[in-house]
Image (cartoon, grey):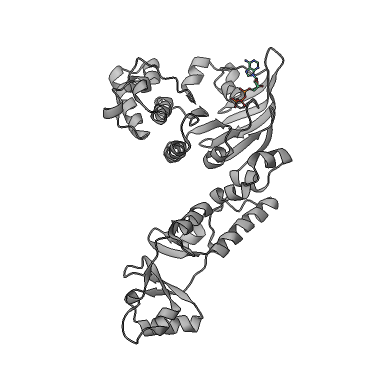
Amino acid sequence: MIRFEQVSKVYPDGTTAVDDLSFEVAEGELVTLVGPSGCGKTTTMMMVNRLIQPSSGRILMDGEDIAGADPVELRRRIGYVIQQVGLFPHRTILDNTATVPLLTGWKKDRARARAAELLDLVGLDPKVYGPRYPAQLSGGQRQRVGVARALAADPPVLLMDEPFGAVDPVARERLQDEFLTLQSTVRKTVLLVTHDIEEAVRMGDRIAVYGQGRIEQFDSPAAVLGAPATPYVAQFVGADRGLKRLSVTTVEQDDLEDPPRVRLDEQVAPAAARLRTEGARWAVVLDEDGALHGWVAADDLALAGPTGTVGDLARRMDAWIPVGAPLKHAFSEMLQWDAGWVAVLDGARLVGVLTPGKLHEALRRSVDADQQGVQRDQVEFDSVADA
Ligand SMILES: Nc1ncnc2c1ncn2[C@@H]1O[C@H](COP(=O)(O)OP(=O)(O)OP(=O)(O)O)[C@@H](O)[C@H]1O
């Protein structure tokens, strides 16, 4: 979709901002450009909408060299989101959002209807926020308007330069999540510039890690964290990259344990006997519909009288993750509920359980796999879901 071929940019004062850059962004892919200040990220991005001309090399969009495109026409195909959102202060939020459709000749009513739709999409009620002026919004809300405005003309490509930079860390994480949800439906081809490796890892399908004017590594977040290509990248992603891996490593079927399952309405005696035979210390308890209820200890079953049901002894279990969730999610559930394991569910159905020992093994395995150049982290959970 977007292809850089040996692109360099030397500014008139002799500064080489970008040096012999070649990479490709696939259609619908979100690539983050990350690196320290002044490494050439913004220059790279602004060459795509021709706000900056390359000194050499070519940039292709859909196979067409953009050097030959009409810049105005080109920019209509490219949404642009910047940190200082750049809203017109004397225009309402609705009219700010409708700017591009109006410029491209839409009738006012149609452009405003589209703008209202977009505000809704980014979580701002158009009835409440549409009539306001930019100064009457919080920083995070203004950034949402920036995203809505960039999407208004439905361009296939989005350029985002530190789009969530001007808000506090909590609002920032929320905006990132919201944008990812949005992106899963609109599937734009996105280049996102950030100097924050956490953001790059969270947001990117792939990450380009910049050194001075050059890409040091272009890879999946898991690979960048698991197998940094150079000492520079290792240093940039940080000593706690093991922790960051928790966010990008998903749980696989091999990671799960399958303890015995008993039902809430099952009689105690046969349930106790079954656990004894299997040598299990506890069992997962399912309700009448087969959904997770909790767990029961083998000792409690063994000590209970001959009458009664498992339901009398079962304890609730609230720690669970959906199949395919990252290890970080599992870890956080364990901490939140002070639980020794988490249930892994496919809808309401129990697929298995994840224990701290298995979580550690999963992390270890993904590091080893990356070091062998094998990307197992991203393996989908289909096999588990089908099991
Ligand atoms: N118009 C210009 N003339 C000369 N040098 C420039 C110009 N614009 C940028 N540079 C230089 O080019 C290099 C790359 O700048 P660029 O803005 O692309 O970096 P960046 O990675 O986006 O940095 P930041 O994260 O600080 O925005 C820097 O050394 C910068 O000083």
Task: Give residue 18's position: percent from left, percent from top.
Answer: 67, 24
**Residue positioned 33% across, 74% down in the render:** 311
**Residue positioned 56% across, 32% down in the render:** 194
Which image quadrant for residue 356? bottom right
Q: Pick out the residue farthest to the left.
A: 127
**Residue positioned 26% across, 28% down in the render:** 127
Answer above or below: position of 250 versus 231. below
Answer above or below: position of 377 versus 47. below
Task: Give residue 69's position: percent from left, percent from top.
Answer: 55, 17
Answer above or below: position of 127 versus 327. above
Q: Can see residue 298?
A: yes
**Residue positioned 38% across, 28% down in the render:** 138
Q: Pick out the residue farthest to the bottom.
A: 306
Task: Give residue 65's position: percent from left, percent from top.
Answer: 60, 22
7 horizontally vs 90: left or right: right
245 horizontally vs 308: left or right: right
- Indicate the quadrant of ligand 1 in the picture: top right
Q: Quadrant of the N terminus?
A: top right
User: 240 or 111, which lies in front?
Assistant: 240
Task: Give residue 182's position: percent from left, percent from top.
Answer: 42, 38
Q: Can see residue 324?
A: no
